[in-house]
Image: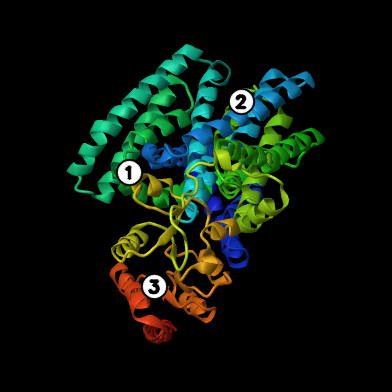
């Protein structure tokens, strides 16, 4: 008991100190946990760390499964299947053959190839969720790719059961099939009933989720297969939308707790590399960080997605999967993997988990650089959700984003019989709003998007997403059109006003109905009305800022 307390104390004391430093200096969390683990690994037992890592992965996998929403994945599943197919065929099978012919043992070749193919559903999903409101499509593409990777990783674990767990392959597949059927039953019948019975109580949802998770893990343990198989199916059992929202929110703190354990344990397992393990790690890192993202982008462009969407999705897949860690750990425990391969996978996973934090921070610059320097384009003939312009765009209004606010403004513009064009990257917008005469399915950050929208001839540009860099893109356009943008921050709103915005929508000051009033005044009241409303906004922002300080 004291050993467990000692281990947890080391994990969280070291993590707290490093997290404070890294958050203050770099605004990064994952590297802090990993480096804390590297320090703690010097005086913590390897056996306990391996056990901690398995449980950390199991819980994170459960949360990922619970977040799945199959209806949302349908828009990205085709492109994701193509990119994963390229990963498996071009990277997995290709490098397996090269490694095996180079003298590696078959199992070692399989483990290294798995590390090259599979990406982390934990890190990738966090990044895709972060940007879901900006580029909804690539967030869904990334999530769909993670789902396919995880399913394939589960299948690989089950196929390797005779080696990893000393049970028959057919037996392992049968147990997994039974858990999957049970999970579907809970998802479709028991979970909605529990939700209604609990009257949306977070405590009851939390206990229900933990109970099913513990039960599925217990079944996995008794059956002699990996606990992550049970954890994944337990997550599927609670993945029914919208009921899963309550469960995921109630478990957010637990997810952070186990994620901290996962990254700390990963860092603690890093050993000083030998020449062999360093070579294996470098191979995995180079392929994961450079080759796989490029192959992903090419696959998505070949499927018809524009290059900005393709590159941004690819940048969420530049890390090694936690499922590969489970496979490597279990193989290491039964001596089915050589020491250099195990240490190479651990080192590569650690490095890619750190580098993905930095590529995320500079994702816009990386994507823009790739778009400018790589001669790759999606042919117009195969572009999905392509542009449709059915009217002559002159003295028109450009509407960026067609969510609640955008749709309300669009309805008003239709009543006024004003020509407008919608810019959005959410495929559901164009599927559910077929009456839109003019729409452009491209990123608002792309110059070609604005050329297609004929922005120089527009009378007004209205941007409804709250992201600052989208607003700044609108303000940078060389046009006489009035520019209306949105921000969730008083400080940023004040800054956007100084940079030339005619009006800034701040949700706490301006509801959607008020925005329609502004558009109406701008269209019918002329320049004086716009100046008057802008002056009022500046005064309100100053009052809010004075109160804030």
Which quarter of the rendered picture does the C terminus lie within? bottom left
- Rounded to the nearest angstrom, the CA distance separating label 2 from label 3 is 54 Å
Kindly tell me whether residue 48 is visible in this rendering: no
Q: Please name the residue shown 81% across and 36% down the image.
A: 275
Indicate the position of residue 373 as horizontal and vertical percent values: 72, 52
Residue at the disc numbered 3: 506
Residue 117 relative to residue 223: left or right? right
Task: Point out the tag, 1 or 3, that comes first from the N-terminus.
Answer: 1
Which of these two is toward me, 297 or 379? 379
Provide the secondary structure element on which disc 1 rests: helix
Q: Please name the residue shown 46% across and 78% down the image.
A: 502
Indicate the position of residue 197 as horizontal and vertical percent values: 18, 42
Q: Please name the residue shown 43% across and 33% down the image.
A: 232
Provide the secondary structure element on which disc 2 rests: helix
Residue at the disc numbered 2: 331
- Rounded to the nearest angstrom, the CA distance separating label 1 from label 3 is 30 Å
Residue at the disc numbered 1: 244
* Label 2 crowd bin: few (<14), some (14–19), many (20+), radius 10 Å: many
Q: Is residue 387 above or below residue 113?
A: below
- Give the quadrant of residue 88: top right
Indicate the position of residue 242 as horizontal and vertical percent values: 30, 45
Which of these two is toward me, 311 or 412? 412
Task: Point out the tag, 2 or 1, that comes first from the N-terminus.
Answer: 1
* Label 3 crowd bin: few (<14), some (14–19), many (20+), radius 10 Å: many
Q: Can you tell which of label 1 and label 3 is closer to the viewer?
A: 3
- Residue 260, label in figure: none
Residue 155 relative to residue 537: left or right? right
Indicate the position of residue 339 as horizontal and vertical percent values: 71, 29
């Amino acid at each position: 008991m004291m050993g467990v307390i000692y281990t947890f104390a080391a994990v969280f004391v070291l993590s707290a100190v490093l997290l404070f430093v890294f958050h203050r200096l770099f605004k990064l969390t994952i590297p802090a946990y990993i480096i804390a683990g590297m320090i703690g690994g010097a005086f913590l037992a390897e056996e306990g760390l391996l056990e901690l890592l398995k449980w950390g992965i199991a819980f994170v996998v459960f949360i990922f499964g619970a977040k799945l929403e199959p209806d949302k994945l349908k828009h990205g599943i085709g492109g994701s299947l193509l990119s994963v197919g390229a990963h498996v065929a071009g990277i997995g099978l290709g490098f397996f053959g090269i490694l095996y012919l180079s003298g590696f043992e078959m199992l070692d070749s399989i483990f290294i190839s798995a590390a090259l193919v599979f990406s982390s559903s934990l890190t990738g999903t966090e990044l895709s969720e972060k940007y879901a409101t900006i580029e909804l499509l690539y967030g869904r593409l990334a999530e769909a790719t993670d789902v396919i990777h995880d399913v394939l990783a589960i299948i690989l674990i089950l196929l390797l059961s005779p080696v990893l767990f000393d049970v028959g392959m057919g037996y392992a597949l049968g147990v997994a099939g039974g858990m999957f059927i049970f999970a579907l039953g809970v998802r479709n019948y028991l979970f909605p009933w529990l939700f209604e019975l609990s009257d949306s109580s977070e405590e009851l949802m939390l206990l229900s989720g933990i109970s099913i998770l513990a039960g599925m893990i217990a079944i996995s343990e008794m059956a002699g297969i990996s606990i992550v198989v049970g954890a994944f199916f337990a997550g599927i059992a609670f993945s029914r939308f919208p009921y899963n929202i309550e469960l995921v929110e109630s478990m957010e703190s637990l997810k952070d707790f186990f994620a901290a354990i996962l990254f700390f344990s990963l860092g603690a397992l890093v050993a000083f590399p030998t020449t062999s393990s360093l070579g294996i790690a470098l191979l995995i890192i180079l392929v994961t960080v450079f080759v796989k993202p490029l192959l992903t982008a090419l696959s998505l462009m070949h499927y018809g997605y524009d290059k900005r969407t393709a590159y941004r999705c690819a940048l969420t897949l530049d890390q090694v999967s936690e499922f590969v860690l489970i496979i490597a750990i279990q193989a290491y425990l039964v001596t089915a993997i050589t020491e250099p391969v195990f240490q190479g996978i651990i080192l590569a996973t650690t490095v890619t988990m750190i580098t993905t934090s930095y590529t995320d921070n500079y994702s816009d610059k990386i994507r823009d650089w790739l778009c400018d320097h790589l001669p790759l384009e999606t042919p117009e003939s195969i572009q999905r959700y392509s542009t449709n312009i059915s009217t002559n765009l002159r003295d028109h209004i450009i509407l960026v984003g067609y969510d609640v606010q955008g749709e309300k403004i669009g309805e008003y513009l239709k009543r006024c019989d004003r020509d407008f064009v919608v810019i959005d990257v959410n495929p559901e917008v164009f599927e559910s709003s077929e009456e839109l005469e003019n729409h452009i399915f491209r990123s608002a950050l792309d110059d070609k998007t604005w050329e297609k929208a004929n922005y120089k001839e527009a009378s007004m540009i209205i941007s409804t997403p709250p992201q600052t860099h989208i607003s700044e893109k609108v303000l940078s356009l060389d046009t006489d059109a009035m520019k209306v943008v949105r921000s969730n921050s008083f400080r940023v709103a004040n800054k956007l006003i100084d940079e030339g915005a005619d009006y800034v929508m701040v949700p706490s000051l301006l509801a959607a109905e008020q925005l329609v009033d502004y558009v109406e005044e701008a269209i019918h009241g002329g320049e004086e009305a716009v100046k008057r409303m802008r002056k009022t906004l500046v005064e309100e922002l100053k009052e809010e800022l004075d109160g804030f300080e």
